[in-house]
Image (cartoon, coloured by chain):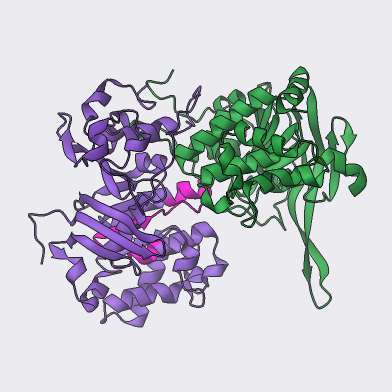
């Protein structure tokens, strides 16, 4: 099957749900004492639910330790969830055995952040891209042609195939990683900070490439990033995470122009915008302190220790993720408020 | 002694090379800019542009590199020719440095308090231990450290990333420097913590009236903080000017390319316009203008003749570019002005 025929199949299913994640949790045990018994748990992900359609990009955003990468790793089953369900086109992957899982694994692939660490220095580009095909026993029949096709797809030259990863720049390495991820005709790509390690001029090349591939191949993306500017550019929908939970989710416009959760608002207002004329024109919400320890998260609302609106209720009751204001998108705050924090620059369209 | 006819810091035709197995890397190749008293100058550029090497050269911290040309004058004195002892008395006193990664810049086995006290007493021998301790706690409080007296006794590993960066800023301003060099001070931090540290840098600057050299790859940080901006590419300064002019009317194709390739937080952009290709190898930089292989304006002259920095525009602030055909950019609207 060539790239194009597989794509045609996917494009017919655009808008259909590919992945559904229900109440996913990942608790990493903390071991202590002489016998290394579990004495607690880091609650990296603590009840996360979302769905992604074919052809759609859902972004998980948040700061270090919010659980976004852990969630991505559970989706591709690099991590075994503590509890919760991962439904791939209705099939529950979380309970499958390794054998049952294998054919499904090819449907979701991951691209890692660091293009220097995620490619073997001892393998040629050809072998790196061919490896998934070999693992799945698909290399013998037309594997070499398939690799050339994949390299072409991500904008690399055929003569690059015999070189080693260290001969390439960061941007080209990331393209190699994308070609590898596409080798098995996946329907969903988990993109874990795919451009964070790249310089801005190169970042834009890779972002454009990813967008073009999505349109051409009908791929669904789970895009994991801390960079809100990139997220605005690539996403259809966004889920904002804080300390292992989703605090607000909605379409790109809902999150960027009508955020209702104080954390989303603080996050958006904190990003420096590259326009010196806006200096001082923006009201910046500066949060106090740091993210609390995920081994011992605050009671009630996890954001309350840094929230300027926190009241007694916030410590007692966990706020459900629901649409309290009728804005059409849910947020997990007892006292949500529509507050557009982004500047509308004078000359903006 | 203060020479008032010259800016606080003058970097004049600086060139720094590194010898490697593959050949000589020209990390900085004729960089030139100045910093006046009390101003914040942002130096921007991508990896390999030479911005960090330039900054590290000021205090003679580039160990394996060799300065092959140029001068770095601070208050009229060439720092490159100063005896080691005199340079040491300037480091951490008149010129202080804030590093990107506080965990590697702070000593892990010494308490934060002792490290600040040490910085204070090193440059003021008459300061008593008790007075230095009080001053250190005062500094920690100034940088927004809650419960400064308790924090004084803690070790760096007991601090979060943001708190460590605060401690390092406290140490940097301890001796009232007249120049602060901040090398990617917020790059390792999360965005809400970055906002806190940027606010703090403004406070520190106001408090000490120190000129600040801000090295960063983040154009947003520069737009937020800097008075003037210096854009570096392949070891050279390609454009400099006041921050509003450079961002709204850039006159170097590389600066235009950088601004065009940025996704924007504050509005929807249909398509990003990346700069084609990648930065040149510094082992064998292209002849003529180093940007010509990626430049949409490039023609024969650019391939042979190296453009020098020259004044453009008619503004009162000095806006300089190193492009032969800068005037052709005047008609092009950029993503920022659009």
Q: Quadrant of residue A336?
A: top right
- Can residue B203 be seen here? The reply is no
What segment carries the magenta color?
Answer: B169-197
Residue A2 position, x and y percent, is 74, 28
**Quadrant (top left/top right/bottom left/bottom right) for the C terminus of chain B:** top left
Q: Residue at x 21, y 75 (%)?
A: B86
User: Any magenta on residue B118?
Assistant: no
Residue B6 position, x and y percent, is 11, 54
Residue B71 position, x and y percent, is 18, 60
Q: Is residue B128 left or right of residue B69?
A: right
Furthest residue in direction left, as rendered? B5
Q: Residue at x 65, y 53 (%)?
A: A123
Q: Nearer the viewer, residue B42 or B164?
A: B42
Q: Nearer the viewer, residue A86 or B152?
A: A86
Q: Nearer the viewer, residue A255 or B280?
A: B280
**Quadrant (top left/top right/bottom left/bottom right) for the N terminus of chain B:** bottom left
Looking at the colours in the rendered structure, which chain would you say is drawn in green? A
Q: Quadrant of residue B136?
A: bottom left
Q: Residue at x 50, y 38 (%)?
A: A203
Display colour for chain B: purple
Residue B184 position, x and y percent, is 41, 53
Q: Nearer the viewer, residue B144 or A271?
A: A271
The correct choice, above or below, for A282 with respect to A134 in the image is above
């Amino acid at each position: 099957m060539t790239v194009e025929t597989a794509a045609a199949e996917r494009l017919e299913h655009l808008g259909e749900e590919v992945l559904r994640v229900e109440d996913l949790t990942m608790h990493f045990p903390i071991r202590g004492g002489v016998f290394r018994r579990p004495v607690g748990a880091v609650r990296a992900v603590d009840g996360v639910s979302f769905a992604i359609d074919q052809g759609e990009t859902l972004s998980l955003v948040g700061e270090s330790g919010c659980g976004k990468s852990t969630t991505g790793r559970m989706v591709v089953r690099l991590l075994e969830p503590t509890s919760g369900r991962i439904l791939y086109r209705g099939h529950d992957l979380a309970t499958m055995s390794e054998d049952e899982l294998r054919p499904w694994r090819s449907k979701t692939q991951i691209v890692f952040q660091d293009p220097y660490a995620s490619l073997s220095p001892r393998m040629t580009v050809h072998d790196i891209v061919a490896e998934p095909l070999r693992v799945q026993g698909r290399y013998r029949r037309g594997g070499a042609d398939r690799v050339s096709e994949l390299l072409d797809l991500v904008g690399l030259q055929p003569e690059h195939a015999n070189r080693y990863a260290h001969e390439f720049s960061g941007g080209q390495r990331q393209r190699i990683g994308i070609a590898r991820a596409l080798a098995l005709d996946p329907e969903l790509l988990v993109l874990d900070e795919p451009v964070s390690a790249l310089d801005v001029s190169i970042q834009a090349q890779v972002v454009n490439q990813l967008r073009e591939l999505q349109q051409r191949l009908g791929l669904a993306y789970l895009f994991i990033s801390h960079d809100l500017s990139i997220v605005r550019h690539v996403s259809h929908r966004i889920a904002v995470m804080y300390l292992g939970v989703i605090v607000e989710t909605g379409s790109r416009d809902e999150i960027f122009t009508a955020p209702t959760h104080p954390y989303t608002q603080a996050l958006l207002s904190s990003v420096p915008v590259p326009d010196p004329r806006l200096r001082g024109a923006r009201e910046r919400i500066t949060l106090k302190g740091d993210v609390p320890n995920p081994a011992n998260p605050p009671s009630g609302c996890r954001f309350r220790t840094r929230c300027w609106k926190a009241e007694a209720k916030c410590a007692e009751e966990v706020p459900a993720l629901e649409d309290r204001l009728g804005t059409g998108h849910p947020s997990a705050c007892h006292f949500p408020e529509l507050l557009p924090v982004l500047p509308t620059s004078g000359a903006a369209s | 002694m203060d020479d008032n006819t010259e800016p606080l810091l003058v970097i004049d035709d600086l060139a720094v090379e590194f010898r490697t197995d593959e050949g000589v890397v020209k990390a900085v190749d004729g960089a030139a800019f100045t910093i006046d008293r009390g101003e914040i100058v942002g130096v921007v550029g991508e990896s390999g542009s030479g911005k960090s090497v330039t900054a590290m050269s000021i205090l003679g911290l580039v160990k394996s590199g060799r300065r092959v040309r140029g001068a770095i004058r601070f208050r009229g004195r060439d720092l490159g020719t100063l005896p080691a002892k005199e340079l040491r008395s300037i480091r951490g006193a008149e010129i202080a440095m804030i590093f990107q990664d506080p965990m590697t810049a702070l000593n892990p086995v010494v308490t934060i308090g002792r490290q600040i006290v040490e910085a204070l007493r090193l440059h003021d021998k008459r300061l008593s231990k008790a007075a230095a301790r009080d001053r250190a706690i005062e500094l920690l409080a100034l940088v927004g450290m809650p419960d400064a007296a308790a924090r004084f006794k803690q070790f760096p590993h007991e601090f979060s990333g943001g708190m460590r960066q605060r401690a390092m800023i406290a140490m940097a301003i301890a001796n009232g420097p007249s120049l602060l060099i901040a090398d990617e001070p917020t790059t390792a931090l999360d965005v809400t913590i970055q906002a806190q540290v940027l606010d703090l840098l403004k406070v520190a600057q106001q408090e000490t009236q120190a000129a600040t050299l801000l090295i960063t790859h983040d154009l947003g940080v520069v737009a937020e903080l800097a008075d003037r901006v210096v854009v570096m590419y392949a070891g050279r300064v390609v454009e400099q000017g006041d921050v509003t002019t450079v961002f709204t009317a850039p006159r170097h194709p590389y600066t235009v390319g950088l601004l065009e390739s940025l996704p924007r937080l504050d509005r929807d952009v249909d398509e990003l316009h990346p700069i084609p290709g990648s930065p040149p190898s510094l082992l064998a930089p292209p002849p003529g203008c180093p940007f010509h292989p990626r430049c949409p304006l490039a023609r024969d002259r650019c391939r042979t003749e190296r453009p020098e920095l020259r004044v453009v525009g008619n503004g009162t602030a000095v806006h300089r570019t190193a492009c032969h055909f800068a005037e052709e950019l005047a008609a092009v609207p950029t993503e920022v002005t659009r």
